[in-house]
């Protein structure tokens, strides 16, 4: 008896529970359960019960799990690989328009690529269309998927096997049988039960039952599944060309494959993901190579629809034995980089380098390695380049990532600066020199020489024809340096200039930190929080962007006195960032130390401080004051108030010496919060130099503390609380009570 595609369905009690969840939570539900337990069927039934139209289906597959937007490929027409966040936003808008309030089912979400997962996250936050997401066992769900319920967007619903009564109903609907035996053998697993009834098998494990079913399929149907093993989904037309119409129809008829209608046409998937997983174990590697080569050769004869399609085809071709143009592979690697998929970029660039020593492939490989925190490997890849025959354009393309890698990932700022200087002497075009100068401004900023950073960056920005990359680096350096110097008008202008450029990757967070710093100094904590949240949402779930966005948010949370929420964000963010060479890593650890110390977590704050100190250096010297403040609060936590005040004073003086007057204002206020009665003497001239709302509140607090003025301290507490600085307000209020006796 064949495993037909028209298996009778029975209504499960779980269906009512899923529909109730969807009624209560418009964002949707995550159906979690073991293999073959019926999650997909339950999702389809729930969508039908909702009665809001035909659902859109996105299906995670093994062959597309490493391809950006792979799961949504059949649903999306994305023309260019641009900024990930912009593409995610555009994709979300497109899908919501297509769905028109109907449910969106995301099946087998464990195999979502990071961008697809970020898209699902975005859709859940929108809450416009109900999402029904199926996940095979919560223990196997990647973090980007588990964030859907961890962040409270979707409600989890555990899907359990059929009970004895439901099994009996299913057996009866399928024609009857020995219900007790079938229930014992299947343990209520619907797929296992179906296989036992339709094949007449007696297997007591699901894999064995699947193997029996697959082994009994005719060769043409097994051939269809073989092609799907290496590339799923395939369009019906492509699969027919590779096999024949009869084979495809037969595969669908017996339930080995299924056809779904998409905007791009009919797409063929396996009847169940487990079929391909078991099939793959039975195909030897030579046959796999043959299948890959055949599919790649066939697909290569037709134009690709999207960047995701191009990357998927290219990766498949790399795995096969057919001819492949190196430029095509390099182009795909560059697209993967732009989309933030570093692992895929590394695989593609590596594949290109196996074919020939290609500069573009080396550049793509170096970026992929460096951004994963593998700076030594990236440097070795670039060091192997023979620069003697490079054009100036090629020289710049090679020199910029090498200098950046030396500065951040290798923690060799002096070497990087010298290298930039030497390269500058080898280029003649003004655009090249401006770009190198802009990067040197960024180096100077991170090294704590903010005045020099602004000087160099402003010189770059005076050139109307400065290249866009130079503008991005220079404007972002000016924005953050100016914000920390207390030049808020200049910071705002530079932010606008930077946002108007086609700025590369993670520079957007430098701009974001300039914005949040300025807003906090202006006493606008709510606006700072919304700005930080916007940058965090913008980052979606891709790393390390997500972690850096969370550092921005934690900065604001700390200022608002919400140490618990800050620590929750910073624990995973700092762990992610310290594996890289970015200066964000030491900053995240400094903030984490402060958050834990605020909460009185003595041991954990000590560990975080040790990690922060070990990773701090010239590349993060701009954040030396934050490290000093962290040290101060750590000392306060263990009861050494005098040493804590000394550490806060040192942090303030460090900030002032480097020209970071706004940071010095904050550090002196931290000293006042810790009980420093002399903080006002230092704050008064600073606030005069850096007029801002926060500075005035800090000075009022410090001035009242100096004379133990309880009324003045209460007034300062009220002002700080009204502005949203609740942690500082609590300290001022405590000091007011102490002064009053």
Image (cartoon, helix red, strand yellow):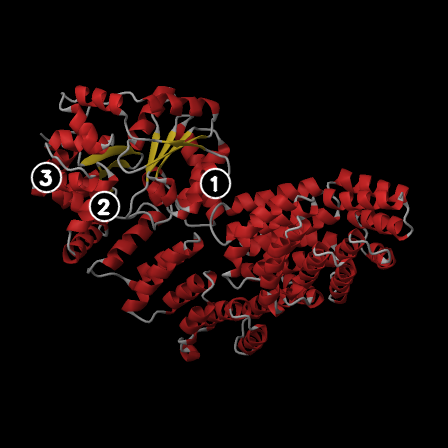
The CA distance from mark 3 to mark 1 is 44 Å
Q: Are marks 3 and 1 in contact (CB under 8 Å)?
A: no
Which of 207/666 is in front? 207
Measured from the top left, where is residue 422 in percent x and y?
A: 55, 78
Which of 167/315 is in front? 167
The quadrant holding residue 209 is top left
Q: Which residue is mark 2?
A: 277
Instruction: State which mark lies toward you, 1 or 2.
Output: 2
715 left or right of 25? right
**SS of the residue under disc 2:** helix
Measured from the top left, where is residue 68 in percent x and y?
A: 38, 48
154 left or right of 587? left
Q: Residues within 10 Å of mark 1 (few under 14, many from 20)?
A: some
User: The C terminus lies in which quarter of the figure?
Assistant: top right
Q: Which residue is mark 3?
A: 217
Measured from the top left, where is residue 586 in percent x and y?
A: 59, 61
Q: Which residue is mark 1?
A: 89
Which tag, 3 or 2, sits closer to the chain's start?
A: 3
535 left or right of 60? right
Residue 467 in sight in this render: no
Which tag, 1 or 2, sits closer to the chain's start?
A: 1
Residue 647 in sight in this render: yes
């Amino acid at each position: 008896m064949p495993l037909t595609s028209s298996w009778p369905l029975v209504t499960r009690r779980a269906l009512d529970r899923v529909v109730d969840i969807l009624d209560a939570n418009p964002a949707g539900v995550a159906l979690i359960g073991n293999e073959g337990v019926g999650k997909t069927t339950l999702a389809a039934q729930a969508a039908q019960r909702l009665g809001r139209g035909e659902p859109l289906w996105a299906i995670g597959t093994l062959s597309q799990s490493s391809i950006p937007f792979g799961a949504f490929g059949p649903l999306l027409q994305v023309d260019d690989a641009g900024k990930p966040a912009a593409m995610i936003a555009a994709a979300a808008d497109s899908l919501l328009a297509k769905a028109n309030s109907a449910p969106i089912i995301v099946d087998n979400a464990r195999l979502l690529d990071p961008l697809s997962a970020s898209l699902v996250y975005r859709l859940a936050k929108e809450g416009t269309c109900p999402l029904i997401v199926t996940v095979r066992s919560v223990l196997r769900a990647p973090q980007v998927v588990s964030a859907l319920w961890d962040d409270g967007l979707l409600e989890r619903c555990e899907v359990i096997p059929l009970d004895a009564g439901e099994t009996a109903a299913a057996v009866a609907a399928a024609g009857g049988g020995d219900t007790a035996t079938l229930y014992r053998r299947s343990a209520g697993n619907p797929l296992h039960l179906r296989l036992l009834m339709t094949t007449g098998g007696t297997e007591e494990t699901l894999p064995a039952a699947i193997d029996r079913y697959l082994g009994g399929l005719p060769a043409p149907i097994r051939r269809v599944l073989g092609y799907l093993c290496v590339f799923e989904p395939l369009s019906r037309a492509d699969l027919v060309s590779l096999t024949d119409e009869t084979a495809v129809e037969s595969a669908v008829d017996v339930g080995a494959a299924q056809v779904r209608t998409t905007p791009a046409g009919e797409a063929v998937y396996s009847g169940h993901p487990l079929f391909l997983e078991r099939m793959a174990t039975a195909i030897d590697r030579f046959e796999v190579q043959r299948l890959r080569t055949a599919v790649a050769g066939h697909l290569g004869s037709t134009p690709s629809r999207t960047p995701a399609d191009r990357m998927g085809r290219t990766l498949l071709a790399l795995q096969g034995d057919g001819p492949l143009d190196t430029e095509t592979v390099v182009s795909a690697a560059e697209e993967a980089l732009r989309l933030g998929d570093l692992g895929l970029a590394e695989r593609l660039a590596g594949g290109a380098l196996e074919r020939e020593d290609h500069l573009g492939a080396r550049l793509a490989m170096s970026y992929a390695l460096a951004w994963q925190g593998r700076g030594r490997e990236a440097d070795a890849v670039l060091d192997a380049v023979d620069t003697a025959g490079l054009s100036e354009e090629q020289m710049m393309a090679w020199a910029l990532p090498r200098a950046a890698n030396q500065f951040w990932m290798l923690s060799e700022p002096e070497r990087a600066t010298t290298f930039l200087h030497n390269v500058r002497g080898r280029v003649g075009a003004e655009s090249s020199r401006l770009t190198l100068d802009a990067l040197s401004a960024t180096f100077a900023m991170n090294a704590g020489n903010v005045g020099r950073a602004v000087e160099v960056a402003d010189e770059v920005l005076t050139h109307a024809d400065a290249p866009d990359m130079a503008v991005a680096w220079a404007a972002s350096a000016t924005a953050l340096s100016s914000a920390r110097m207390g030049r808020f008008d200049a910071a705002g202008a530079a932010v606008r200039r930077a946002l108007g450029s086609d700025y590369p990757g993670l520079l957007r967070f430098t701009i974001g930190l300039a914005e949040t710093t300025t807003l906090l100094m202006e006493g606008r904590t709510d606006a700072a929080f919304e700005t930080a949240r916007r940058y965090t949402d913008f980052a979606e779930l891709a790393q390390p962007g997500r972690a850096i966005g969370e550092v921005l948010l934690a900065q604001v949370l700390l200022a608002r006195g919400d140490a618990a929420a800050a620590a929750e964000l910073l624990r995973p963010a700092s762990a992610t960032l310290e594996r890289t060479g970015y200066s964000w890593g030491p900053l995240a650890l400094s903030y984490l130390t402060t958050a834990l110390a605020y909460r009185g977590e003595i041991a954990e704050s000590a560990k975080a401080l040790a990690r922060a100190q070990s990773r701090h250096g010239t590349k993060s010297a701009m954040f030396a004051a934050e490290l000093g403040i962290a040290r101060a609060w750590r000392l306060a936590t263990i009861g050494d108030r005098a040493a804590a005040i000394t550490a806060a004073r040192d942090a303030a003086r460090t900030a002032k010496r480097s020209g970071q007057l706004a940071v010095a204002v904050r550090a002196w206020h931290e000293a006042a919060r810790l009980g420093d009665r002399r903080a006002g003497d230092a704050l008064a001239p600073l606030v005069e130099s850096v007029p801002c709302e926060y500075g005035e509140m800090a000075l009022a607090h410090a001035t009242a503390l100096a004379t133990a003025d309880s009324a003045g301290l209460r007034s300062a507490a009220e002002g700080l609380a009204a502005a949203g600085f609740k942690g500082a307000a609590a300290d001022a209020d405590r000091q007011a009570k102490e002064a009053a006796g």
